[in-house]
Amino acid sequence: MTQSPFAIDIEKVRQGKVEMQVHEKPAALELADIEGVTLDQPVTGHLTYSMSGSDIIIQGNLSTHYCSTCVRCLEPACADVNTKIRLFFLAKGDKDDPTAFDEEVEDLDVDYYSGELLDPLPQIRDAILLEIPVLPVCSEDCKGLCPQCGVNHNKQSCNCQQPEIVTEHDAWKNKLKGFKLE
Ligand SMILES: [Zn+2]
Ligand SMILES: [Zn+2]
C-alpha cells in the first residue's frame, strides 16, 4: 500500500505534537471516484497528531465540496462538506481495554496501529464520506418533479391533476425507484 498524505512516522508524534496543514486533491484521498458523487474542490483543513501513553489521537477539521444529484428533482445537488476528525488509535497488543476509557473519549473512533507508520487514510476517508448525505437535495425546499408529467416544479408548474396530496415521503420514494443505494 502506498502512503497517503496523512501517513505519519510514529516516532515524530512520540517526540511531540505534530500539526499538519491539509490541502489535497480528492484523488489523493481515493475520493475521486465515488459512485454518484463528485468532490470538486480540494480537501483542506488541519490535523493534529498527538500521543497519550502509547495511544495516538488525531483531531482536526477537513473541508471540501461535493456535487451529486438531487433525489427530488434530479438536478445537481452541491454543498460544502465539513468534517470533524476525531480518531483514536490504540497500540496493537496493548492490554488496555478500549471500553475502559471514560466518556470523554467515548465519541472518538477507536482503531489500532502497529509498527512505526500510521496511515489513517481509511478512517479519514470514511469520516468525510459520512458527511455526504445519502439522499442529497438541491435545496431543502426543492419541490421535485411532477410525478405525472415530470416537469420540474422548481422551474414551472403544470396542470396535472394531483390525485391526492403526495406526501414528501411518497415523492421521494418515486424518485428513488431506479436509484441504487449502496
Ligand atoms: Zn432538487
Ligand atoms: Zn405535471
Image (cartoon, rainbow, N blue to C red):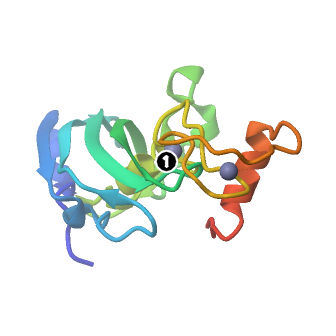
Q: Is residue 105 above or below residue 150?
A: above
Image position of 120 (left or right of 106): left
Q: Nearer the viewer, residue 121 or 33?
A: 33
Residue 128 image point, x, y percent: 39, 48
Number of marks:
1
Say which residue appears at 53% left-offset and 31% top-offset.
140
Residue at image location 28% in from the left, 60% down from the top: 119
Q: Is residue 13 above or below residue 68?
A: above
**In this rendering, position of residue 101 left or right of residue 65:** right
Q: Quadrant of the C terminus?
A: bottom right
State the image coordinates of residue 82 (x, y, percent, origin top left).
Answer: 34, 35
Quarter the N terminus occupies: bottom left
Question: Can you say whether 29 is above or below 161 in the image?
Answer: below
Q: Nearer the viewer, residue 167 or 102?
A: 167
Q: Please tell me which residue lies in front, 174 or 59.
A: 174
Residue located at (51% from left, 50% from top): 70
Name which quarter of the figure residue 177 lies in: bottom right
Residue 90 in sight: no
Q: Could you tell me residue 63's position as x and y percent?
A: 27, 39
Q: Quadrant of residue 59?
A: top left
Q: Is mark 1 within 8 Å of ligand 1?
A: no
The residue under label 1 is which amino acid type?
Leu
Residue at the (52%, 42%) spot, across then down: 156
Give the residue at mark 1. 130
Query: Which residue is at the far right?
Result: 164
The residue furthest bottom is 1
Query: Does dot 1 land on a helix, a strand or a loop?
Result: helix
Q: Is residue 182 visible?
A: yes
Q: Residues within 10 Å of mark 1 (few under 14, many from 20)?
A: few
Residue 52 image position (x, y, % from top left): 33, 33
